[in-house]
Image (cartoon, rainbow, N blue to C red):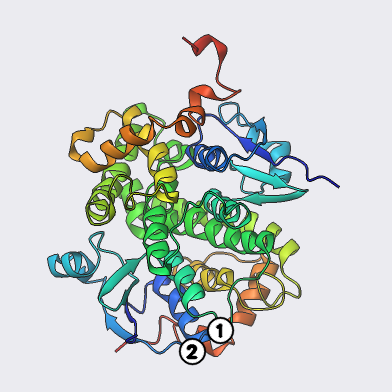
Amino acid sequence: MSRPILYAFHVSSCSWRVRIALAHKKIEHDIRVVNIVNRESRSPEYMSKVNPAGQIPALEVNGNVIAESLAILEYLEEVYPQKPLLPKEAIERAKVREICELIATGIQPLQNPKVAARHSTETEKRLEWTEYYINRGFIALEKILNTTSANGKYCYGDSLTTADCVLVPQVFNAIARFKLDMTPYPKIMSIYNSLMKLEEVKLGHPDNKLS
Amino acid sequence: MAETKPILYSCRTSSCSFRVRIALALKRIDYEYRSVSLLTHEQFGEFMKINPMAQVPALVVNGKTLCQSVSILEFLEEKYPEIPLLPSDPFDRAVVRELVELVNSGIQPLTNDSPVEYHSSDPAGQSAWEKHWTTKGFTALETRLAQTSGKYCFGNQITLVDLVVVPQAVNAFKLNIDMSQYPIISRMYTTLMELEEFKTSSPSEQPDYPSELRK
């Protein structure tokens, strides 16, 4: 099997999720930079050859492409079972996925700048919208993580899971992009600070431009 | 000790609950239906102890509460594998999951009551918002389905995509979107809604469907 190719961009939070998993599992791969700021993912070439929805990240495996970060994470877990990112037991796996989905459906799509821009032309109203939806998600997440995190280092139990892959970029965005007050979320911050020390997380940091 | 029946917290109007109802029906899982009225904002009351996100569905299995419809669907797939709703090949499974997420994170969260009502208190504004995100998402979905569909959304097997597309299509019909733009999505809807499990899972067949609306 040839090396998978990841279509990604350094500021894409969904790309970061996948890059954490690839690094954690030590999966050798190639990167193709897709500049979403320049709308490269919406180019006819990208949409016809890689992903018709014009999305990143996308993973090309032997000439075939899958998109959607959560689908890619599940694929990597199945095909590269070393250094697992999901527990073994079904209920536990469900709880990890629940955390992933809470962020991936309950927060990320709503705080997307394009969505906020559609809501209002006024910067202040866009920020209010964004903060509302991040806070709504974080309030629920803080409660859940207080029951699932063993020691405040990881979202679930005491090891890295896909939930951590999804958490990191969202918290980063909240802090770096929107300057959200994180005081109400000590558990989220404890886990985030812990994760940000890991090499596999640091590798995908938006400050590290992809080449 | 015998396992107790799973409890599904659901609202008839919730597309995400609809997805799980279809899975339970297809896998022949008997369950207890507990309604949560989104109309009266019941989700913000005691129900928040079940799901702090105040969203349906939630599934309680032997005392353990599971939230997020796609996580529940994956759990049901693992615990009740006899009638599979995912292919067996990992790449095929990834394609199915991609299509699921296209709707699950790309369309549904933006057309949920919360952002619709936050965006506008005026019905025309609300409708325009919902239509925008639905048509944008359906355009992408239709293109992808052209590559993956057979009799159903992925080849000729009913998979999780079908469970997610049908409820979203139901919502699209309510918006008076011109569905002729999406012939594959429309065909999927028609084909799948002929199946007993999809019919019995429909909003109008649920215990919380108002009797005065029944024909």
In the figure, residue B49 lies in which quadrant? top right
Callouts 2 and 1 close, C-beta under 8 Å: yes
Q: Is A103 situated left or right of A114 in this image?
A: right
> Quick check: B46 left or right of B214?
right
Q: Amino acid at mark 1?
A: Gln
Residue B136, x across and y down, in percent: 26, 48
- SS assignment at label 1: loop
Residue at the extreme front of the image, as rendered: B82
The spot of residue A190 in percent (x, y) is 68, 75
Compared with residue A27, is residue B131 higher up or lower down, i.e. above or below?
A: above
User: Dot 2, crowdedness within 10 Å: few (<14), some or many (≥20)?
Assistant: few
Pointer 2 indicates a residue of which chain? A
Q: Which of these two is toward me, A92 or A199?
A: A92
Using the image, determine if residue A33 lies above or below residue B167: below
User: Can residue A88 be seen in the rendering of this structure?
Assistant: yes
The kind of residue tagged 2 is: Lys
Mark nearer the viewer, 2 or 1? 1
Give above or below for A141 relative to A24: above
Residue A82: assigned label:
1
Q: Nearer the viewer, residue B164 or B178?
A: B164
Q: Is residue A37 left or right of residue A4?
A: left
**Co-location on one chain, circles 2 and 1:** yes
- Quadrant in the rendering for residue B81: bottom right
- Residue at horizontal 31%, vertical 32%? B190
Instruction: Report the residue marked by disc 2.
Output: A26
| Mark 2 residue element | loop
Q: CA distance from mark 2 to mark 1?
A: 9 Å
In primary-sequence order, the first of circles 2 and 1 is 2
Judging from the image, mark 1 belongs to the subunit labelled: A
Residue that extends furthest to the right in the rendered view of this protein: B1
In the image, what residue occupies the spot 16% across and 65% down? A48
